[in-house]
Image (cartoon, rainbow, N blue to C red):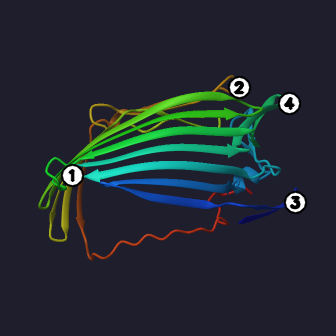
């Protein structure tokens, strides 16, 4: 159960929601496993989204929060199949995410200008599948060939904007290591992600690195953005009051070379901690 209490000078409300998280696993035998996961949780608006303070973006555009903004609610269903035997390690995944009352950015005319403010949409759906195949030709970690493919289909419905979009993300990496020497290469297909009425191109990934570990010392050399400048693109989806289409090329990043030297003072067990509290907000409201 999740209890949410929100209080401001404009509005006070409390909600109690049943937010289960279920994980079911079954071993099929022969190195195969099947896992089903269901996650149900609220998505709280940030302080900036709730703030009534106005921020001028340009001469004619103002941004403001929405104290009436309600929590979104996300339900996620995941099915994962894994197979690990011999030189193969295969993972297949299916994902469905449904978000009720998603937070999106709305635009409206106020006098001679335009105001941006967050609102609750009707619903948002995301369907995705993933296939990850790792091949170990020598049966160990001497050489790893890793391929990753993720097709995605997204839908958004709201009074402000509705869209249907699909994307395909692919990744290939090669890792070779012998004693203290390690070689790494990675290339990813450029693709777009969609969120709240905007599309943004993921950062291009085409890198190679070589490192050598000698005792506690590690020496490394890497090359980023091999053969191409860093390219970023984001734009507004649909016909809206304000259309944004921003393209950025950083030619100085092309074939960027990084040299590194590191010394490890100590080594110990890695520990991962998970926080379940959701009462922390990292945004900084404007006062």
Residue at (63%, 38%) from the top-left corner?
A: 125
On screen, residue 12 versus residue 78, left or right, reads right
Check disc 1 and report its element: helix, strand or loop.
loop
The residue indicated by pointer 4 is 111
User: Which numbered disc flags the more N-terminal residue, 3 or 4?
Assistant: 3
Q: Earlier in the sequence, mark 4 or mark 2?
A: 4
Q: Counting other residues with Cα less than 10 Å from the Cα at mark 2, is it few (<14), some (14-19), or many (20 or more)?
A: some
Tell me the element at label 2. Answer: loop
For the residues labelled 1 and 3, the Cα–Cα distance comes to: 63 Å
Residue indicated by mark 2: 240
Q: Nearer the viewer, mark 4 or mark 1?
A: 1
Compared across the picture, whether 3 is left or right of 91 comes to right
Which residue in the structure is indicated by mark 3?
A: 9
| Distance CA(mark 2)–CA(mark 1) | 54 Å
Of marks 3 and 4, the one in the foreground: 3
Mark earlier in primary sequence (2, 1): 1
Q: Nearer the viewer, residue 24 or 255?
A: 24
SS for dot 3:
loop
* Separation (CA) of disc 4 from disc 1: 68 Å
Residues at badges 4 and 1 in contact (C-beta under 8 Å)?
no
Relative placement, left or right, of 254 versus 216 is: right
Q: Nearer the viewer, residue 12 or 225?
A: 12
Q: Earlier in the sequence, mark 4 or mark 1?
A: 1
Rendered view: 274 above or below 286: below
Figure quadrant of the C terminus:
bottom right
Mark 3 to mark 2: distance in Å? Answer: 31 Å
Rendered image: mark on residue 86? 1
* 49 relative to 23, above or below: above
Residue at figure coordinates x 69%, y 27% from the top left: 242
- Residues at circles 4 and 2 in contact by the CB criterion of under 8 Å: no
């Amino acid at each position: 159960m999740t209890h949410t209490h929100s209080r401001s000078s404009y509005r006070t409300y409390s909600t109690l929601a049943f937010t289960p998280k279920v994980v079911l696993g079954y071993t099929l035998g022969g190195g195969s496993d099947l896992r089903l996961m269901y996650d149900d949780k609220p998505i709280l608006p940030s302080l900036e989204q709730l703030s009534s303070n106005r921020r001028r973006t340009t001469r004619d555009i103002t941004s403001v929060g929405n104290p009436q903004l309600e929590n979104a609610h996300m339900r996620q269903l995941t099915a994962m199949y894994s197979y690990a035997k011999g030189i193969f390690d295969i993972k297949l995944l299916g994902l469905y995410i449904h978000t009720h009352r998603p937070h999106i950015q709305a635009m409206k005319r106020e006098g001679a200008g335009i105001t941006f403010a967050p609102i609750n949409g009707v619903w948002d759906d995301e369907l995705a599948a993933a296939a990850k195949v790792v091949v170990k030709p020598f049966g160990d970690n001497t050489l790893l060939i890793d391929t990753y493919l993720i097709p995605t289909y997204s839908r958004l419905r709201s009074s402000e904007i509705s869209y249907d979009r699909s994307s395909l993300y692919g990744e290939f990496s090669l890792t070779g290591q012998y004693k203290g020497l390690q070689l790494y290469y990675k290339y990813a297909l450029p693709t777009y992600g969609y969120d709240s009425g905007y599309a943004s191109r993921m950062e291009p990934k085409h890198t190679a690195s070589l490192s050598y570990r000698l005792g506690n010392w590690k020496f490394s050399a890497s090359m980023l953005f091999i053969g191409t400048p860093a390219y970023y693109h984001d734009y507004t989806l649909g016909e809206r009051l304000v259309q944004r289409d921003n393209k950025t090329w950083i030619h100085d990043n092309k074939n960027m070379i990084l040299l590194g030297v590191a010394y490890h003072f100590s080594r110990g067990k890695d520990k991962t901690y998970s926080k379940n509290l959701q009462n922390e907000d990292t945004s900084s409201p404007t006062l």
